[in-house]
Amino acid sequence: MRFPGSLSARIIAGFAVLIVTFGGISLTAVLTTTNLNSTIRVIQLGYIPLSIESRNLSEKQQGLLSYLRDELTGEPTARKVEMKVRRLRDLRDKYVSNLEKALDEVSDIPPVHARDFARTSQEISDIRHLVAGTGPLYAQVLAAPPLGASATRPSGGLPTEALGSVAADSPLGKLQRMESRIARKTQTLEGRQRADVQDTARSLEFGSRKMRLLTIMWGAIALVVGLLITIWATVNLRPLRRLGDAAREIARGDYGQRIDERGPREVADLAREFNTMGSAIQERERELVRTERLAAVGKMAAMITHEVRNPLSSIGLNTELLEEELAELSDANGATTGEARALCQSIQSEVDRLTAITEEYLYFARLPKPKLQEEALGPMVKSLIDFEREPMSTRGVTLEVDLAAELPPVMVDEGQLRQALLNLLRNAGEAVGEVGSGRVRVYTRRGEQPGTAEVVVQDDGPGIVEELAAKIFDPFFSTKEGGTGLGLALTHQIVRDHGGSIRVESRPGHGAAFIVALPVAGGAPV
């Protein structure tokens, strides 16, 4: 399975799918829960109060109608009729008002229930209108109630329109028919409210079952998506395994281990950083070996030099005495001693050379720790160039200097740094001498790393092949005939003791450049 884009983009895409899935689940659950809550709220605040009040209204209306049909004509006094009718009418009006109030208190009615509430509102309005129409009839009945009168009544149920002819034409007959109509309206309202409550309860139960099924379904989908994304992420992270294998190889000591810089962008970047780390570890291992070798060489050089210096001094002294004796013998006897004296001079020359080598070994073995002080880099380099300009000129080497302005002072031991730069300068002059003539350019500049300044010694010599570039700072490694191989090793050690670094840039046939980076005083940015 291969997917375009970076590893992070792939993982983000996978998690985006997972988030969208869970977002869909959450949204569905929220919408379903909102609908259920809305339905519950409508039942609590609308259907149930309306059902209760409509039932109460129907009962009170039936009580008022029963009184008008069965009890009014049997009352002994008009006063009692008036009190009883007023109480029953007030109760009826109270529940009509309660219905209107309950209907007004229902807000944010869902569209699915809006039609039911509109119909209920119309029915309550009709009842209110009919109730208002009974006012004049009650005024007529209460003005002259038919006390002790008789009327034809049906047996059971609501009174029919076929009451006695006298009763039907009387105000009481008309009032009974009007109240019968209102009673039918209230019964219809009560029945419809009860049916609405039952329908809504069934809808609520159905919504609950639907929500449970949706939750199970979406949960299963989320589980499947999560498993797929886990497998997909595992496949995409598989390239990291080779990074782990390479890291174990480095842990076993194979510092040359490198891996392909391919795969998703992050994996490629990690591989690149891993290879950089491997190179750094390899370089530090090489540096550690070089340091240990330097320490061993230093001890050996000190021992050998100590054992060789005294015999060399004796040989040199005896050679001088022998040369003087030969000179006196030649003057006294007139003998020819030229060949013997030449041999003595050759011996003395070799003794001087060996003495210089032993002194170099001894200096290498006893290299002290630098005493760092703030020094201006430009004047130091200029002084060294002026000191070497004449010897270089005699060998056909042109010295050029270019000192950067306003470089901060560096922390150095001036004597040791001069020795290191002098070694670089003389090596550059010897390299130019190999091709006959040329130039050596020395310049200072701001360091590539913050808080450093650099001295560059560049020559027009034959350059250094890549295979040798990694070895030129090792002790006793030299490409020059008769060289000790300690000059660059000593320079490298001095620069490292100063907390700096030295590197070489070269192309065969195009010369070489040695770059010495030194920390500036106080670590200030350059």
Image (spheres, grey):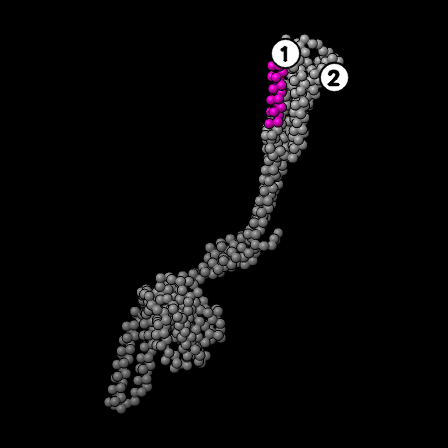
Q: Which mark identifies residue 78?
A: 1
Q: Is residue 144 left or right of residue 375?
A: right
Q: Quadrant of the C terminus?
A: bottom left
Mark 1 residue crowding within 10 angstroms, few (<14) / some (14–19) / many (20+): some
Residue 299: x and y in percent read 33, 65
Q: Nearer the viewer, residue 401 or 491?
A: 401
Mark 2 residue crowding within 10 angstroms, few (<14) / some (14–19) / many (20+): some
Residue 523: x and y in percent read 37, 61
Quick check: is 519 in the magenta stretch? no
Which three-letter amino acid code belongs to the residue tagged 2? Answer: Glu
User: What element does badge 2 sit on?
Assistant: loop
Residue 464: x and y in percent read 46, 72
* Residue drawn where x is 73% and y is 11% of the image: 152
On screen, residue 436 above or below 410: below
* Residue drawn where x is 44% and y is 71% of the image: 513
User: What element does badge 1 sit on?
Assistant: helix
Mark 2 or mark 1, whichever is nearer to me: 1
What's the magenta region? 78-101
Q: What is the quadrant of residue 146 in the picture?
A: top right
The residue that label 2 is drawn on is: 161
Residue 324: x and y in percent read 26, 84
On screen, residue 189 above or below 233: above
